[in-house]
Amino acid sequence: MAFSNNSDSGAISDINVTPLVDVLLVLLIIFMVTAPTVSYPIDVNLPQPTLNPPPQTQEPPPPIALRIDATGQVFWNDNPTPLQAIPGMMKETVQRDPTNQPLLEIDTNEDAEYGILAKVLAYAKNADMKKIGFVQK
């Protein structure tokens, strides 16, 4: 026991860890305060909740199947299409009915270049396409 009144025991050999714990807690608080907080704002357009959703009056148009194969060839509804023609086709599709756009289903080969997919996504964004999905196999 640390608080014994036994006079024959001599010095107490237990280590007092209270000052060590105090110093460690102070250091922990200092490091927590001085550590940089990593926070980068990301703008995300989330749909807002509505109590009364508008009724679906129009039948959605058939989806557009856009496929990119391993060689980088782009297929629009299974028709080979040059990459430069894709932006015009997307804009034309959106201009037909901007409120009732078809779903753009993108299917890429795992060996396809990412740069081509990035261009297709940029074209879709520039054409203001709202419905974009990826096909999983």
Image (cartoon, rainbow, N blue to C red):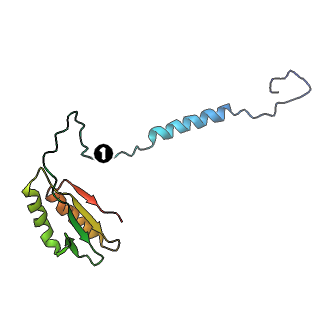
- Residue appearing at x 23%, y 39% in the figure: 48
- 115 with respect to 22 (left or right): left
Does residue 124 lie above or below 72 as drawn? Answer: above
Residue 43: % across, % down: 26, 46
Q: Is residue 8 left or right of residue 121?
A: right
Which quadrant of the view contains residue 73? bottom left
- Residue ID at (84%, 30%): 11
Report x, y in % for residue 124.
18, 60
**Between 77 and 41, the one nearer to me in the picture:** 77
Between 112 and 25, the one lying in front of the other is: 112
Q: State the image quarter where residue 67 is shown.
A: bottom left
Q: Position of residue 123 (x, y in %)?
A: 17, 63
Q: Residue at x 16, y 41 (%)?
A: 55
Crowd tier of the residue under label 1, counting other residues whose Cα lies within 10 Å: few below 14, some 14–19, many 20 or above: few
Look at the picture and state if 30 lies above or below 94.
above
Q: Quadrant of residue 8?
A: top right
**Quadrant of the image for the C terminus?**
bottom left
Vertical relation: 69 (above or below) 61: below
Quadrant of the drawing holding the N terminus? top right
Extreme residue in the right direction = 8
Amino acid type at mark 1: Pro
| Residue lying farthest to the bottom in this orientation | 71
**Percent x, y of residue 20:** 65, 36
Number of callouts: 1
Q: Residue at x 55, y 34 (%)?
A: 26
Kindly identify which residue carries mark 1.
41
Q: Is residue 36 left or right of residue 94?
A: right
Along the line of sight, the residue nearer the viewer: 51 or 19: 51
**For numbered disc 1, what is the local secondary structure?**
loop
